[in-house]
Image: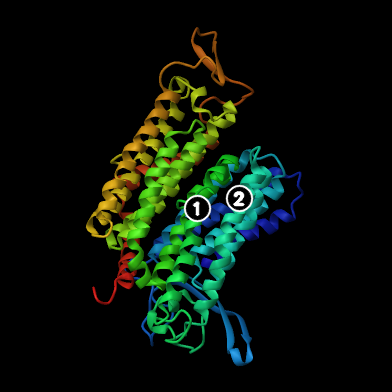
């Protein structure tokens, strides 16, 4: 089932290759069917997943599969290397509570991204082939349990994202695409070196061979004592942790590695901004939880304070930058940086409450920020501008749009009753519970105040009050004697149409439902997160 959910988009891409470029509607439908099939499989996995089983580790003499579910494990690349031994790379897939939530999120956002791409007219065939390749690579990262396989999927994401921004983006798309590519590739190159060092430092307890298995690597009993990343080589383990952390932090993005994100978001077409904010950023913090922290638990424990500091910087700095923006899309991009800081703060707490809050924030941020970028795309399609000061009084003429924007912005703000509140509350409960991050959390709370400032100020300027004299639209008096809004060069329905409602309503429903009753997600992740916290807790404290 995991192989199917990973490779369905690639199968769709191969079908699209055989479709003539002129058949744009068929190309769109094939992509949508593949995305919907992914969604069905994600629901089946969610329904069949047993949340009572933890993941992460197995005993030194036990099964290397641990407690992961839907496991697929077969030999992939096996080479005899003479005196160096052998190279054993496996096709190893599986999910636990940490990854199954991300599988569901990826399937949801991928399907919504296809609907958002429906209006793409430029080189439709090439666009959807690259889009489907990106969807497969993202899903593969979340289910891969072999470090080599994870790295293949991780690198595979770079190619389609580079072209999707560089070809279908805005006026400065080439600059944004190259910046994104170079930043991410920089972290990946050093990640490769750590991966090789780990391979020659870990022995599979069942086969007795070196292994790329993340399950085996997460068990410190499987490390060779005299290996370069063995338990006695403290310096090299600290260096390896730092290198991996930077590689994942770039993807988050964490200050000061964040500068690629606003450029990428502003220049990317709306569907790619949705994918970028909804899924790709989560791969950074997911990589920390799956690889970075459990492989070097003692280094993580020594680094919690530093990680918490960077989380607080993200929260406050991102909010300040958002407050200064006139471009609506850039404001949402900086707010995304701020909200990913809550994830870092929750991880830095190192306890169950904080990490559960961090993982739940990853899921909620994916749905809320995807909704925000879709809403930005809606108004840009009509007005051909994203300048906040160009608008005013929109609530009178686009009431449905204004209502959905209000829900999305208050969810981003963390209003009780919406999903963002639950995850942020759990993060702060965990951070205050930890002596290491308690005072950092006190400072980080200011991010909520600044978040309210930029969101409510933007809401007031765009949707309330009177129309601005230099607005991007005109008001015409109709035959009924009432004023009607008229966007320049816009021929469609002024308020949301059926396709746009189909994209947005599911995200609104999820945001409200999980804000009132979060247990469908929290119940799924708790056992695996508790096991991860146990792995990360030093023996002296256990």
Please say if the residues under marks 2 and 1 sit with CB atoms less than 8 Å apart.
Answer: no
Residue at position x 58%, y 66% in the image: 189
Residue where numbered disc 2 is placed:
179
Q: Of the numbered discs in the image, which one, if any, rests on residue 257?
A: 1
Q: Is residue 37 above or below residue 210?
A: above
Answer with left or right where residue 339 lies relative to residue 121.
Answer: left
Residue at position x 48%, y 33% in the image: 325
> Marks 2/1: CA distance?
11 Å
Q: Earlier in the sequence, mark 2 or mark 1?
A: 2
Task: Tell me where residue 255 appears, x and y as whole percent.
Answer: 45, 51
Q: SS class of the residue under badge 1?
A: loop
Q: Is residue 504 above or below residue 300?
A: above
Q: How is the rendered protein coloured?
A: rainbow
Answer with left or right where residue 93 lies relative to residue 161.
Answer: left
Q: Nearer the viewer, residue 332 or 16?
A: 332
Q: Is residue 214 above or below residue 222?
A: above
Answer with left or right where residue 192 lies relative to residue 122.
Answer: left
Task: Tell me where residue 351 appears, x and y as whole percent.
Answer: 28, 63
- What residue occupies the far front of the structure in this picture? 235
Task: Tell me where residue 420 appears, x and y as whole percent.
Answer: 35, 45
Q: Around disc 1, counting alpha carbons within 10 Å, would you say few (fewer than 14), some (14 to 19), or many (20 or more)?
A: some
Answer with left or right where residue 27 lies relative to residue 93.
Answer: right
Quarter the C terminus occupies: bottom left
Q: SS class of the residue under badge 2?
A: helix
């Amino acid at each position: 089932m995991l192989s199917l959910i990973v490779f369905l988009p690639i199968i769709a891409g191969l079908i699209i290759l055989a479709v003539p470029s002129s058949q744009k509607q068929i190309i769109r439908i094939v992509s949508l069917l593949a995305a919907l099939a992914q969604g069905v499989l994600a629901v089946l996995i969610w329904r069949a997943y047993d949340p009572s089983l933890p993941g992460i580790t197995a005993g030194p003499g036990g099964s290397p599969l641990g407690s992961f579910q839907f496991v697929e494990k077969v030999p992939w690349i096996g080479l005899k290397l003479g005196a160096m031994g052998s190279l054993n790379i496996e096709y190893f897939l599986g999910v636990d509570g940490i990854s199954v939530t991300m599988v569901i999120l990826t399937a949801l956002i991928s399907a919504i991204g296809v609907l958002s791409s429906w209006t793409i007219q430029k080189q439709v065939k090439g666009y959807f082939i690259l889009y489907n390749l990106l969807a497969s690579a993202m899903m593969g990262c979340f289910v891969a349990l072999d470090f080599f396989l994870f790295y293949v999927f991780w690198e595979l994401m770079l190619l389609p994202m580079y072209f999707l921004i560089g070809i279908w983006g805005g006026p400065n798309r080439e600059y944004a695409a190259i910046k994104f590519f170079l930043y991410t590739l920089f972290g990946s190159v050093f990640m490769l070196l750590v991966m090789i060092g780990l391979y020659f430092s870990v022995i599979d307890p069942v086969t007795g061979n070196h292994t790329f298995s993340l399950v085996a690597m997460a068990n410190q009993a499987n490390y060779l004592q005299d290996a370069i990343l063995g338990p006695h080589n403290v310096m090299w383990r600290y260096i390896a942790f730092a290198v991996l952390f930077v590689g994942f932090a770039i993807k988050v993005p964490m200050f000061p590695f964040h500068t690629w994100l606003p450029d990428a978001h502003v220049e990317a077409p709306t569907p790619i901004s949705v994918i970028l904010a909804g899924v790709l950023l989560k791969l950074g913090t997911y990589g920390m939880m799956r690889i970075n922290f459990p492989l070097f638990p003692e280094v993580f424990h020594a680094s919690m304070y530093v990680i918490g500091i960077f989380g607080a910087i993200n929260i406050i700095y991102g909010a300040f930058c958002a407050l200064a923006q006139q471009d609506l899309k850039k404001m949402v991009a900086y707010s995304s940086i701020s909200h990913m800081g809550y994830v870092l703060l929750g991880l830095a707490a190192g306890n169950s409450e904080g990490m559960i809050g961090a993982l739940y924030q990853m899921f909620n941020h994916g749905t809320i920020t995807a909704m925000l970028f879709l809403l930005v795309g809606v108004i840009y399609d009509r007005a051909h501008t994203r300048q906040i000061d160009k608008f005013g009084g929109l609530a009178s003429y686009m009431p449905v749009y204004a209502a959905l924007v209000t829900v999305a912005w208050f969810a981003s703000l963390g209003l009780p009753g919406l999903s963002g509140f639950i995850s942020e509350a759990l993060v702060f409960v965990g951070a205050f519970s930890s002596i290491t991050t308690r005072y950092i959390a006190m400072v980080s709370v200011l991010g909520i105040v600044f978040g309210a400032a930029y969101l409510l100020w933007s809401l007031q300027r765009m949707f309330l009050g009177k129309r601005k004299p230099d607005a991007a639209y005109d008001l015409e008096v109709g035959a009924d004697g009432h004023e009607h809004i008229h966007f320049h060069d816009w021929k469609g329905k002024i308020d949301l149409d059926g396709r746009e409602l189909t994209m947005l309503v599911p995200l609104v429903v999820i945001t409200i439902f999980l804000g009132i009753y979060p247990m469908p997600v929290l119940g799924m992740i708790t056992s695996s997160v508790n096991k991860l916290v146990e792995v990360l807790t030093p023996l002296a404290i256990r």
